[in-house]
Amino acid sequence: MKECKEVLSFLFSLNNAYWKAIEDGSISIGDLVFLYETLKTAGPAIEGIEKVLEEFQNMTAEDLEELKAFVVQEFDIPNDAVEQVIENGVKLVLDVVGFFMKLKTMKAG
């Protein structure tokens, strides 16, 4: 659950930075300040990103409930949408990991 939580924290932080940056209708160098929180969450998220699939595949019903509660509490996501948000977030991460692994294979070979 640790890795899933860290990756979701990073995704939500990136989402918040994006929306804050475009709030005035354009993105400029001044918007870098919004990336500060995202950068704090990036290290832990990236460090264990390869373990997310394993955690997700081994997730019990209790783990899912814990993850839902985490998302609702930390990110103010409505209860009726939280499961879809988690599934979409984990799917996005798995797609990104797959992309990076494919690039690594192509580069090596």
Image: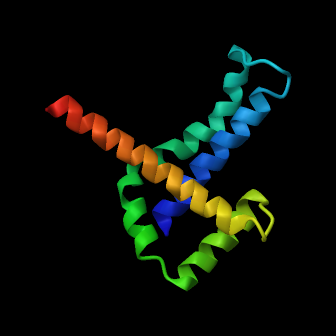
Percent of width and height locating residue 4: 51, 62
Spot the residue most to the right. 24
The answer to whether 65 is drawn above or below residue 7 in the figure is below
Residue in the picture at 36% in, 47% down:
98
Percent of width and height locating residue 78: 81, 65
In the displayed structure image, the side of residue 19 where residue 7 appears, left or right: left
The answer to whether 82 is drawn above or below residue 102 in the figure is below
Q: Is the image coloured rainbow, by chain, by secondary structure, or in one colour?
A: rainbow
In the displayed structure image, the side of residue 65 where residue 59 appears, left or right: left
Spot the residue most to the left. 109
Percent of width and height locating residue 13: 65, 44
Q: How many marks?
A: 0
Frontmost residue, 40 versus 6: 6
The answer to whether 80 is drawn above or below residue 28 in the figure is below
State the image quarter where residue 96 is shown. top left
The answer to whether 62 is drawn above or below residue 75 in the figure is below
Percent of width and height locating residue 81: 75, 65
Residue in the picture at 51% in, 43% down:
42
Residue in the picture at 39% in, 47% down:
97
Which corner quadrant holds the C terminus?
top left
Residue in the picture at 51% in, 55% down:
91
